[in-house]
């Protein structure tokens, strides 16, 4: 990965290059930003830049042996840690055990990172792993193996780099094992943490990192890259850039969905739920809950998050602030029609129900009970909204 491959973030790229030129490389850095802003690509590009034999003031050369191996994720001095779990994919390849380690899934990591340019989401990774109803975790086995590897000398005589993606998934025992290593690392050892939820990282690890916070990518930058890299027409590129809300990854997903003729499943589920509630079709609501229950916790959580975004757009539309909403044309009609029911009288109740559902999913509650009760609660809120509108 080179800096030139990363969309936007020019100021941060400049800062990272200066740390190398001035010999001020921090031994532990945390790249954090919303999904799709480029935290993982920046960490990868930074590690490659540090180890490049022929780097310039602007970028790594991309051609020396170090760059070649970094780009193929085969460099012996660069190690990758990410959340994993047992899965069908792992069993099929004969690489699973009771407590899997990251290196058992390195073949999948080497596939998905180049395919997405590093702009992958946690859900993308779990789907590639074949995890159905589990959350990934970085366990103590990974930490012990990393401690062992860090005890060896560098193969190439340069920096040993460790890229830890989603450190918020570190098990407490793994974090405690890594703490001493992060606090007092061997010479020329670089820890690059990449997180989208830094507030969930164990405090003892977080406090020992230098934070690099990534802002959202400007709409103009995303639109320009969509026209030059993806060949989109200028008006369509501007529309997608606005909807992406500063995320290059989100923009790429919209293009892919358009090309495949697919729709946003979470959006469809939300709209169906609201129509069933409006029509008070209780049998349909029970069927909806039955369909939601087997999705898996990660998909259920993503449904809640996506739904909160749609509620926001409906509320903004209802108070005449459509310009701040991010609904695409296909969803705009629904937001206009449904906005009277997401008013100052009901919006807090809606948000509370979705946030409660999200918290209960994270606590591993019974999904059939949770979604059935949730659907009935939402139906009651819409009933109140209908009554107030009649008055």
Image: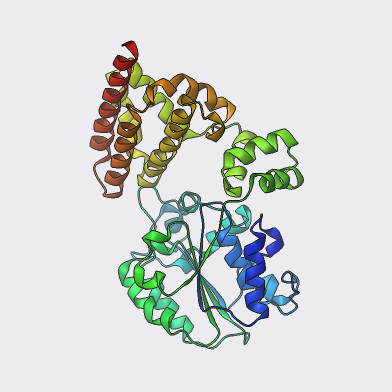
Q: How are the colours assigned in the image?
A: rainbow
Q: What residue is drawn where x is 42% and y is 68%?
A: 101
Residue 345 placement (x, y as % from top left)? 32, 26
Residue 127 placement (x, y as % from top left)? 47, 49
Q: What residue is drawn where x is 74% and y is 47%?
A: 229
User: Can you tell which quarter of the image residue 371 is in?
Assistant: top left
In the image, residue 320 above or below residue 215: above
Instruction: Pick whichever, 365 or 344, lies toward us.
Output: 344
Q: What residue is drawn where x is 49% and y is 53%?
A: 125
- Can residue 108 be seen? yes
| Quarter that holds the N terminus | bottom right
Instruction: Pick whichever, 178 or 210, lies toward us.
Output: 210
Instruction: Pick whichever, 224 or 150, lies toward us.
Output: 224
Residue 374 placement (x, y as % from top left)? 27, 32
Number of numbered callouts drawn: 0
Residue 67 placement (x, y as % from top left)? 69, 72
| Quarter that holds the C terminus | top left
Q: What residue is drawn where x is 42% and y is 32%?
A: 311
Q: Residue furthest top?
A: 390
In the image, residue 117 above or below residue 298: below
Left or right side of 360 for 57 = right
- Can residue 268 be seen? no
């Amino acid at each position: 990965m080179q800096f030139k491959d990363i969309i936007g973030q020019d100021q941060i790229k400049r800062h990272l290059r200066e740390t190398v030129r001035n010999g001020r490389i921090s031994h532990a850095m945390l790249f954090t930003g919303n999904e799709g802003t480029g935290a993982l690509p920046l960490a990868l590009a930074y590690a490659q830049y540090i180890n490049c034999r022929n780097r310039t003031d602007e970028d790594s050369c991309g051609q020396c042996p170090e760059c070649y191996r970094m780009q193929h994720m085969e460099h012996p001095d660069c190690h990758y840690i990410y959340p994993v779990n047992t899965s069908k994919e792992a069993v099929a390849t004969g690489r699973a055990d009771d407590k899997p380690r990251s290196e058992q899934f390195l073949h999948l990591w080497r596939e998905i990172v180049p395919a997405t340019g590093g702009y992958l989401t946690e859900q993308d990774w779990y789907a590639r792993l074949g995890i159905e109803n589990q959350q990934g975790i970085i366990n103590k086995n990974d930490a012990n193996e990393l401690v062992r590897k860090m005890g060896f000398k560098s193969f190439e005589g340069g920096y040993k780099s460790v890229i830890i993606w989603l450190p918020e998934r570190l098990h407490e025992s793994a974090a405690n094992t890594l703490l001493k290593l992060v606090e007092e690392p061997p010479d020329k050892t670089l820890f690059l943490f990449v997180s989208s939820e830094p507030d969930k990282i164990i405090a003892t690890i977080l406090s020992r990192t230098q934070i690099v916070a990534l802002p959202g990518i400007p709409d103009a930058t995303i639109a320009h890259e969509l026209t030059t890299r993806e060949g989109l027409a200028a008006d369509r590129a501007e529309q997608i850039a606005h909807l992406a809300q500063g995320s290059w990854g989100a923009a790429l997903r919209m293009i892919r969905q358009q090309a495949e003729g697919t729709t946003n499943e979470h959006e469809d589920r939300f709209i169906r739920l609201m129509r069933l509630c409006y029509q008070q079709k209780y049998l349909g609501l029970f069927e909806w809950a039955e369909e939601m229950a087997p999705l898996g916790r990660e998909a259920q959580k993503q449904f809640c998050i996506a739904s909160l975004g749609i509620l926001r757009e409906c509320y903004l539309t209802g108070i005449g602030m459509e310009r701040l909403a991010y609904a695409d044309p296909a969803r705009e009609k629904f937001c206009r029609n449904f906005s009277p029911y997401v008013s100052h009288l009901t919006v807090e109740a809606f948000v509370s129900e979705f946030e409660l559902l999200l918290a209960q999913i994270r606590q591993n509650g019974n999904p059939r009970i949770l979604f059935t009760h949730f659907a009935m609660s939402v139906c009651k809120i819409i009933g109140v909204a209908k009554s107030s509108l009649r008055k």
